[in-house]
Image (tube, rainbow, N blue to C red):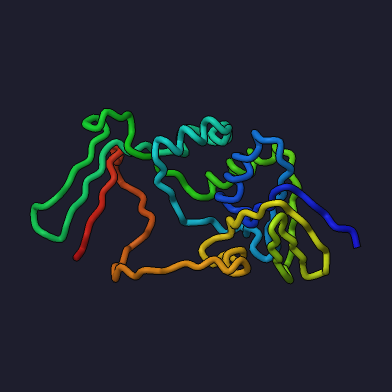
């Protein structure tokens, strides 16, 4: 059976995996991107939004992702008001006071993901789509990956970008710890009746 090889394997084709692929583009590295067929994106809209820092926005601009994002898809945050559960207690963060143009930018997950997908379409890399994996064997100088059909792949480095329930992490016996903060957050999307004036609000209930 033929063995396929590459310098780097990125496991996970989400935003983190695609960002890693874009970052490696500038180097003379043969890269593969692995995604699981069962986790391929469906047609349902994703409700998630991200608040990105000005530094992240500069990275998106520098690496060509913003070429696939119209300006109206990134909403600037110029002020943040934080309210506690105590009466008349609040904090205010203002971009002007901090000597910044914006404190952050809000962007929808689907829009950012589409921009990354368009960006990596301009990159030369090997795409690997599989339904499952049988084994991951880590040696001193290489990593062997075998899929459910017995096809073997070899890489010099593997990067796990496959989420919190990372298969790469479990196969690599990487230890991690979790900490419970005993807090509950309400996360939802709203449509404002009036212009929000670039102001974000945060409310602590307890």
Relative to residue 110, is residue 102 drawn left or right? left
Q: Residue at x 57, y 59 (%)?
A: 44
**Rendering coords of residue 147 (x, y %):** 77, 66
Q: Residue at x 24, y 30 (%)?
A: 96
17 over 131 or under it: above or below: above
- Pick the quarter of the image with the N terminus: bottom right
**Which quadrant of the figure has residue 106?**
top left
Q: Observer-nearest residue: 104 or 197?
A: 104
**Rendering coords of residue 60 (x, y %):** 51, 36
Relative to residue 106, is residue 61 drawn left or right? right
- Which residue extends farthest right? 1
Relative to residue 206, is residue 13 drawn left or right? right
192 over 74 or under it: above or below: below
Label tally: 0
Q: Residue at x 66, y 37 (%)?
A: 25
Q: Observer-nearest residue: 48 or 196?
A: 48
126 over 43 or under it: above or below: above
Relative to residue 11, is residue 189 drawn left or right? left
Q: Residue at x 72, y 49 (%)?
A: 32
- Pick the quarter of the image with the C terminus: bottom left
- Which residue extends farthest front? 140
**Rendering coords of residue 15 (x, y %):** 56, 49
**Rendering coords of residue 176 (x, y %):** 47, 67
Q: Observer-nearest residue: 84 or 58?
A: 58
Q: Observer-nearest residue: 43 or 107?
A: 107
């Amino acid at each position: 059976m033929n063995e396929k090889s590459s310098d780097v394997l990125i496991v996970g084709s989400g935003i983190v995996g695609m960002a890693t692929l874009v970052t490696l583009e500038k180097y003379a590295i043969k890269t593969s991107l692995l995604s699981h067929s069962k986790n391929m994106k469906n047609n349902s809209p994703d409700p998630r939004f991200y608040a990105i820092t000005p530094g992240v926005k500069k990275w998106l601009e520098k690496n060509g992702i913003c070429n696939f994002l119209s300006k109206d898809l990134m909403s600037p945050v110029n002020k943040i008001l934080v309210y506690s559960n105590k009466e008349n207690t609040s904090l205010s963060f203002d971009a002007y006071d901090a000597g910044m143009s914006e404190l952050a930018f809000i962007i929808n997950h689907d829009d950012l993901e589409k921009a990354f997908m368009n960006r990596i379409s301009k990159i030369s890399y090997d795409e690997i789509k599989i339904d499952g994996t049988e084994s991951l064997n880590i040696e001193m100088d290489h990593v062997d990956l075998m899929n459910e059909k017995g096809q073997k792949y070899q890489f010099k480095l593997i990067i796990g970008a496959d989420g919190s329930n990372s298969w790469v992490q479990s196969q690599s016996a990487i230890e991690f710890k979790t900490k419970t903060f005993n807090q509950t957050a309400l996360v939802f999307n709203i449509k404002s009746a009036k212009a929000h004036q670039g102001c974000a609000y945060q409310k602590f209930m307890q």
